Image: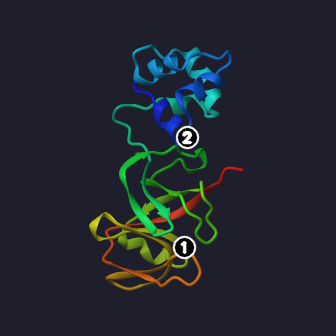
Amino acid sequence: MINRIRDIRREMGLTLADVAARCAPPTTAQTIGRLETGTRQLSLTWMNRIAAALTVDPELLLRGEAAPHPRYVARLTADGAEALAAPRDAILPTALAGDGDLLALAIESPAGQYRVGDQVWLRRVDPADFARLLNRDVLAPRSGGRFAFGRMIDRDASRVAILPPDPGQRQVVVENPAWLAVAEMLVRAL
């Protein structure tokens, strides 16, 4: 059985010892590590204990081998939207369940209305539907594995113009994007 304990733990910035201490009753970091790697069987009791420690639903701890799951593909830094070294699993908010290719953008530097730690959930849109994205926040793939993120302010047959979220920045023109991903949900920790 494949589990996502490590992915969720890392996404929350927790160590094995942190999760072990949060379990009720507390356990050892070694036990959590063995459960993550599958060297120890993940029983229903362990699933419930670890899910409570991570404050997620127990079913989020499991994933099927063939089932696609949402991924972080980019992050927003002081230098703009950039690709991650390697995509990583993202924890799906239940309100976004449904059809479509979901992506997530991690905000690592404040930009406009976005704060450090925010997650922006986006749904991928094909070129035929770009017109409906005008004046919406979008993520656009660019050449060389780069991205542009901001408000789509203009489009024509071959390009889209995106205004980054920080005031005073110049628009970015993306030529022939294969797809855009429109922001559908902002997840912000309180």
Q: Is 169 displayed left or right of 112 in the figure?
A: left
Q: What residue does disc 2 label?
A: 13
Secondary structure found at label 2 = loop
Residue 33, percent from left and from top: 47, 22
Residue 174, percent from left and from top: 36, 78
Mark 1 and mark 2: span between their CA atoms? 30 Å
Residue 17 or residue 123, whichever sits in front: 17
Residue 114, percent from left and from top: 61, 65
Q: What residue type is labelled 2?
A: Gly
Residue 186 occupies quadrant: bottom right
Q: Is 28 displayed left or right of 79 in the figure?
A: right
Q: Which colour scheme is used?
A: rainbow
> How many other residues sit within 10 Å of disc 1, few (<14), some (14-19) or many (≥20)?
some
> How many other residues sit within 10 Å of disc 2, few (<14), some (14-19) or many (≥20)?
few
Residue 136 or residue 80, whichever sits in front: 80
The quarter in which the N terminus is drawn is: top left
Residue 56 sits above or below residue 131 on the image = above
Residue 26, percent from left and from top: 65, 17
Report the disc number at residue 19. none
Q: Is 73 displayed left or right of 53 in the figure?
A: left
Q: What residue does disc 1 label?
A: 136
Q: Give whichever of discs 1 and 2 has the lower sequence position.
A: 2
Which residue is outermost to the left? 144
Residue 36 sits above or below residue 127 on the image = above
Residue 139 occupies quadrant: bottom left
**Mark nearer the viewer, 1 or 2:** 2
Residue at 51% across, 21% down: 32
Report if the CB atoms under discs 1 and 2 are less than 8 Å apart. no
Residue at 67% across, 15% down: 25
Residue 77 sits above or below residue 4 on the image = below
Residue 45 or residue 166, whichever sits in front: 166
Residue at 61% across, 72% down: 112
